[in-house]
Every structure is written in C-alpha cells, then in structure tokens.
Image (cartoon, helix red, strand yellow):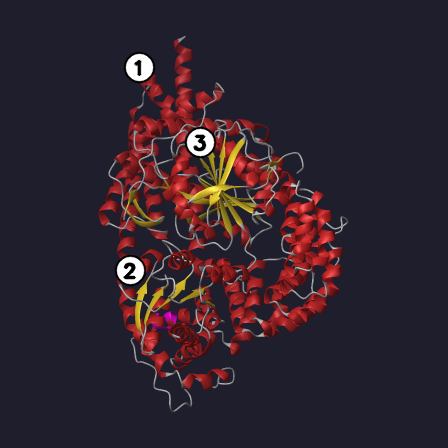
Amino acid sequence: MASILVVDDDPDICALLEFKLTSGGHAVTVEHDGEAALAALEQQKVDLVLLDWMMPRMGGLEVCLAMRADGRYASIPVLMLTAKAQESDVQRGLAAGADDYILKPFSPREVAARIDASLARAVR
Amino acid sequence: MKGFLVTSVIAFNILVMTYAVAVAFAQLALVGGAVMNLRRELRRNLASRKDDLFAHPDTPGLSVLVPAFNESPMVAECLRSVVDQRYPEFEVIVVDDGSTDDTFDLLREAFDLVPTTRVIPQDVPTIGRILELHAPRGGGNLLVIRKENAGRCADALNTALNAARHPLVCTLDADSVLEPDALLHIVRPLVEQPEEVVAAGGVVRPSNGMVLRRGTIESVTLPRRLIVQAQIVEYLRAFMLGRIGWSWLNSVLIISGAFGAFRREDVVSLGGLHPDSLGQDADLVASLHRRLRLERGKDYRVVIVPQAVCWTEAPQHRRDLRRQRRRWAHGLGQVLWRQRTAMLRPRYGRFGMLVLPYHVVFEMLGPVVEMLGLPAVIAAWWLGLLNPWYALTVFALAIGFGMVVSVAAVLADEVSERHYDRWRDLGSLLLAALFETTLLRVMMAWWRVHGLSDALRRRRSAWASMPRIGFSRAH
Amino acid sequence: MVDANGGLVLRLTVALTALVVLLVCTTVVTRGWRRRRERARTAAEAVARPLILAALDAENSAAESESASASESGSGSGSGNALAPNPPQVSPRVGRYLDSMASAMAGKLRGGDRAALVELLRRRGSVDRALRHCRSVFTGRRLRAVELVGSLGLVEAVPELAARLDDPDDEVRRAAVRALGRTAAPDAVPALLALLDAPQRRESEHYITLALLRMGPPAVEQLTAALRTHGPNGRRAAAKVLGWLGEPHAAGPLQAALDDAEPAVRSAVVEALGRIGLPAPAPAMRELLRSDQPSPVRVAAAVALGRLGDPRSAEALAGLLTEPHLLARSAASALALLGPAGLTVLRAHAHVPEVGEVLIGRADAELPDLVTTAGGRS
C-alpha cells in the first residue's frame, strides 16, 4: 500500500492508471499538469510519482528537475511515461533524475510491475 | 465647365457602383473558398496527425524567431507559452532589438539567463551589431540575442534567422501567446508535403480578455470595449474567411509575421527579410511567390492552417489603432510597389493575374474609393443628379454585404473552433459585427488612405511599439 | 424608372437582411446543437468508462491466452470462450461511444490490456462490423472502420487495410498507412515503400516511415531487402527506419548501400549506421566525408561518425573544420564525442569559431577570445 501521484494530461490514461493501481492496492492521486503536481506534493505524502513529459503549465521534465532540487522530494522515485521516444529524450529524462522511462503506447501491467519494483528498491 | 463636372460625377458614380458589385462578388468567392477549405480541414483526424508528428523521430527541427522591442509587460508570459510547446525539437530565438525598457531584465529573471556563446553565420545581411547572447542557466531551448537597434523589425528577424539552426523557421511576435500544439499544427503542411508547401501561416486572434497561467490559456472572455470586439470580428473575417479562402486557391499573399512558418533555406536564398519594408512578412511571401512561379510554375503551395492559433494583443484605443492601420496600409503599398513588375504578367500565373490585382484594387485602393464615394454623392446631390434609389442601392450593397460576410465569419469560427463560450459573448460578437461593417469601417478607410499616402510619399517610419496592457494573470 | 429602382433596392435589402438573419440563426443553432452533443457525449462516456475498466479487470487472466491466438479467432464474434462474461448490455448510443473510447484507449496501450479491449470489442461484434465497413461506399464510415481496426492493431485486417492504400479518399489512405503500422505485419512493408516511388506520389513519406517504425523488429527483414530493390525514395525510407530501429543485423546490408547512386540515400544510410553504432563500417563511412561528396552527405557522415565515437575518425573530421559553417559545426560537435583524440584535434583548431563554441561547453581552461559572428566565411 503506497501513495502514488499520477500526472498526465490525458484523462483516459489517468482513469486507466488510477483504476489499475487502485485495484493493485495503492492509494492514487491524479493531477493533470505540472504545477498542480508540485502543489499535490506539498500537501500529502507521496511514495512515487508517475509523470508525463509533455503537459501544460510546466512539463514533466521541469517537475522532475524541481523535485530533485528540493530536499524534501529528492528521494521520491519518479517514473516518466511519455511518447517522446528519441534516444536523446530518454537520456535527458534519465539525466533529469527520473528512475525509469516508459514509452507510450504502454502496457499498464508493465507499469504496475515497474512501480512495484521501484517501490521495493526505495524501501530498501 | 458644368458639363464636364456632370460627366465626371456620373462616370465616377458608375465606377463606384461597379466597384461595389465587384467587392460583393469577390467577397462571395472568398467565402466559398473558405467553406470548401474548412470542410476539408474539419474532416481530418488532426489529433492522430499531431501525435504522429510529435512521436516521429524525423520531424524536422524548428527555430522560432521572436523579434522584441520594448515589450516588457507581457514578453515573459508570452515566451512561456512558446517555450513549453509540445514539439519534438525546437529552439526559441528572441532578439532584443535594443529595447529601452526592462524587457531584457524581465526575461533574465523569468528564465534565469546567463551569458552564452554561439557562432552565428552571416547568411543574410544584417545592420545592427550583436551585443551579447544569453541562454537559461540549466540549458534549454531558449536563446536571447541583444543587438543594437536598427529601427527595423526586419533586421531583428534577419539576425534571428542567421542564428537559427533548424531547417524550419517560424516567425512570432513577442506579444503573442500560442495555443497548445500551435507549433505542431503550423508545421504540419510543411512536413506532410515537403515538396509542395513552402510556407504556412497561422490564424491570429486578438488576445484581449484572455487570462493566462504559466503560459497556458486559462480562459478567454470577450473584452468589453466595442472597438476591440469589432477588431475581433475583423480578424475572424480576415483569417477564417479571407486568408483561408485564398489558401484554398493556393494564393495566400499575406502570412502574418505574427505567426508564420517557412523553410530556412528559402528565406536565406531570398536574402532574408527586406530591411526597409514595413510589411516584411507580406513582402517575404510575395517574393517567394514571385520566385517560385518562375522556377516551379504551379507546383508549390502557400497555406493557412486554421488550427494553428496565435493570440496577439489588439490596440485598445483609437489612437493606437489608427497608427497600426496606417502602418499596415503603408506596408501593403510598399509590398505591391515592389512587385509591380509581376503585375498582370501571365508568366507569374495566378500570382500576377489574380492575387496582385486583387490586392491593388480591393485592399489598397478600396479605402480610396470608399472615401471618395461620399463627396461624390454630395456633388451629385448639389448638381441635382442624385438618384436616391441609386445611392441607396450602393449603400445597401456595401453595408449589407459587409454584414453578411462578418456574420458568416462568426459562424465559421463557431463551426470550426469556438472560443467565446458564453451566450452573452456570442450576442455581443454578432452586434459588434454590425458595428464593424459600418462605423469602424469608415474610420479604417480614412486611416488606410493616410497610410497609402505615406507609402506614396515614401515616408520612412520606425517600428514603434504600442502601449501594452498585458494579460490578466491567474495565480 | 424610380419604381423599378425602388423595387430593386427593396429586394436587395430584404434579401441581404434575410441572409444576415439566417446566418445569425445558424450560428445560434450550431452552438446549441454542439452544446447538446457535448452533454450527451459526457453522459455517455460516464456510463461507458466504468464498463471499459471493468472489462479490463475481468479479462486480465482470460485475455492473455486469447491475445496469442487473436489472428486465428476470426471465426465469429463472441464465440467459444465459456469463461468470459457476456459483453455489457448498453443502448446503441452509449455503445457507439463505448466502441470509440475503447479503441482510442487501445491505441494508447500495449500488451495484455490492449488484448482485453480487443476482446471486448470483438464480443460486441464491433470488430466484424468494422472489417465489413472497411469497404463501405460511405467515406466517413470507411474512415472510422479503418481507424478502429488500426488502433486495435488487428492482424487479420491486414489484407483489408492494404487494399485501402489506394482508396480514392486521402484521409482514408492515411488512416490505412497508420493502421498498417500498428499491426506489425511485415507483409505490408513492400507495399508501403512502393507508395513512395509511385509515379503520381500522393502519400506523405513522413507517415509511411512512422508506420514502418511502429512495426518494429518484424519489419527488419523486408526493410533490408528493400535497400537493394526499391526506388530511391523507398531505399532512403528503408535506411532511415532501420537506423531508428537500431537493428545490428542490418549493419551489413546498410554498409553495402553506402555507395548508393543517390546522395539522399547515402545520407540516410550513413545516418542509420551511426544510430546502430557498430564500429565495423566506420572506415567506409569516413569515405563519405571526402570533398567529392555533396555537402548534406558530408554533414550526415560527420554526425554519424560522432555517434560511433571511434577515435580513428578524428583525423578525417579535422579536415572539415576549415569548411563552411554547417560542415565545420557538425565536425566540431562530432569531434567532441570522440574522447581524448577528438579533444586534441579540437584544441589544435581552437581558433575556429565553431570549435570555440564546442569547447566552451566543456569548461576548458584556455578559451579563445570568442567571436559571436563568423562573418565572411559562410
């Protein structure tokens, strides 16, 4: 049981991930833009963030950089979920401090498995 | 003496009548073209095209060129909407053309700028010397060039063009806000048909009444001032009907410099933008047309993309509006003068035979005829020649047709993309359409005659800035 | 006379006024109609979304086995599987939204969950209907059908989709190209590439290469073969896609294509070899830096050699530093990727502005006084 923040501007994807992760036993918060995501981090304890890259009001990369620069959130695992498929993008995403990089179209089961793996590593 | 006067008044009145009928038919043709084009566009699955362009590893890079001169109230907020656009690979090059206000300081603060360096080839000639280059501290897709003011917007654009490193370039005014995905939309024709499309223009709308949050449009309400509402209708008419109609004929002459995309090599091979032109954007498109008509014949296209929307502030006060329109008319005069050798020459195809004559007769001389119409009516009355029914017919044609077209523009906007969501706004917009075709049009005609006379006297005028209000910001 | 004219002006005024009123009414009606449709849509989606999510949950286990045999089970809708629950019963209107939502969602997914959505639509009979509608005489219906089977990535739809590649409607053709990309059926590769060299070219190369890229590894064999057999546009596209796929097995055939007669193909081939990243073709790639090659080929070769990172390329790249801006810049950026050997060359050419720009990014000790304008040499 972990608290997961899902940030994506696509309502379909949000609904799907919320459903999947909730039925996987996690508490899920959904936000649709980067600014709101940072606000949500302020308000509650979050164990893991699932971030889209391209969003209105602050992209995922900026959110990731902001989190890594802030001592309170620096250790929260971040998974990037994005359609930006070029290898240079993957490099940039990981360099910004993302722990994992998942390409769209994605497999929700794979995402759930990666989240569990990340959470297990973070606990240790 | 009186006989001559009578003949000339009658002749002129016949001319005005013919002109009014011709305007009506030309407008109808453009509305028809626009309807055909919108029909075609609305059928397209744009969402999937956008996603594909974004995901494609081979979507060409884009350099957004932003000339800025004393733009302080809004420049940072506007650039935020550009820098955060969804596009695979792009850079934003802002040229601070020797601003005397705090434009640069605001930029430095908003984007955490630090001095940087970049080799800038002299691909097209420029006038103002480059003073310094800045980029965000953590890296990023923004470059700010500070240069000496050369009194010309075109020089700032040429400097940015030299610095641009991507195959596509897009010009953008510093006071513009882009809708999400506007960049993907505007390059779409250039990427889908790389061999045919040479330039693509966006749709410009007045941004007054818009609320922004972090470069994203929060809401748009119709502004209160009638003069601004009327301009909104006017922009709708110019873009949703006029230019989209021309686009259907592949004969767009004016791509607004406020938001237009080109291939860098094309602009470079024309020697950049014409430094002395006030309408450097129209001048560029006209020169492109001219060269490609000779080189490729009919095999190229200049298009308008209805979904690529850019919001830019319209003047709030009559004085500023007057100055703007006078400058535009002056610029148009310059452009048409530069292209005079292509006028009515069959080897320039549609460009020489249709586009240029249309713009001379209806866009450039239109206001002159309208302004002379009134004294002609008075003269006819004084000479006892006035047939009231005739006068009324001309009047009904001019005003009535204007109204039909303006309301059609509001409808076109409603069908394609609706922006003013409240019923009340729709009502005001329709009322403004009526005002726009009557009073405002007379004022505009008067200012445009002024602009034309400026052009005839070859007056030089520097690019002056308009007093900006800035956006409402939501925090 | 006056009467006739008066009649004319009256008629004109009435006609124009009527036209204005008509347009105003149309505007108002359009807005009202759109609002209603949006409300209906929101309501229908609120009903459909939980149904879709429930289907995903229920079929989590069942779908996995089915997805493997998806291509064979074209024997009819809703057949067989006794374990699977019946499709949700909904009104036809909600059903339409359910179909389009489920297929849109399937387009964003991979793996078992996509298979579950395919199964849901199959049991609703929507898949069979779409396959039939691929040949409908109505363009709109054809388009929707092609888009649906495309986002589901149905292998059994490939012949139907291939037939749509010469549909009279350009939107349908494009949807067919896109759909074929999602099916990962390599049989369609030659047909897609052939579109690029068709006498009256109508399809956008951009979307065709993306479709080929989306097919992924299954397409490699056909793409490699195409390097020899297709026209110049097809060969170039095949080389590009092989590079993006980063397929090591393609390096040999690509290297053999380095001396293609078309410069545009050579550029694409050398770029692809750079992306694949095997060291063996490097000497052959360096040949493309020579001054008898067109400038775009030399730029592509420089970028590719930078990606390979082979220090033995330093010498050849150094020769480009004295060339015009674009070549010099590509060479300088490439040299920066070659490790110590590249850095030595760059330091020796520190007076070249393009080299200075690259070096400044590395916080090097002795920086040349940097010019920002490289006048005169472009």
Image quarter (top left, top right, bottom left or bottom right) of the N terminus of chain C: top left
C82 in relation to B141, above or below: below
The secondary structure making up most of the magenta span is helix
Residue at disc 3, secondary structure: helix
Specify which label sits upstream in the sequence, 1 or 3.
Answer: 3
Residue B113 pos. (x, y %) = 44, 43
Q: How many neighbours does mark 1 have within 10 angstroms: few (below 14), some (14-19), or many (20 or more)?
A: few
Image quarter (top left, top right, bottom left or bottom right) of the C terminus of chain C: top right
Residue at disc 2, secondary structure: helix
Gap in angstroms between the C-alphas marked 2 and 3: 57 Å
Q: Residue at x 36, y 59 (%)?
A: A71
* Relative depth, front residue between B255 and B16: B255
Q: Is residue A16 visible in the rendered structure shown here?
A: yes
Mark in the foreground, 1 or 3: 3
Q: Quadrant of residue C214?
A: bottom right
Q: Quadrant of residue C328?
A: top right
* Relative depth, front residue between B312 and A22: A22
Q: Is residue B297 visible in the rendered structure shown here?
A: no
C279 in relation to B457, above or below: below
Range of residues picked out in magenta: C97-101
Residue at disc 1, secondary structure: helix
Residue C233 pos. (x, y %) = 66, 59
* Same chain check for tags 2 and 1: no
Residue at which label 2 appears = A42
**Residue B382 shows which numbered tag?**
1
Residue at which label 3 appears = B363
Residue B249 pos. (x, y %) = 51, 44
Gap in angstroms between the C-alphas marked 2 and 1: 79 Å
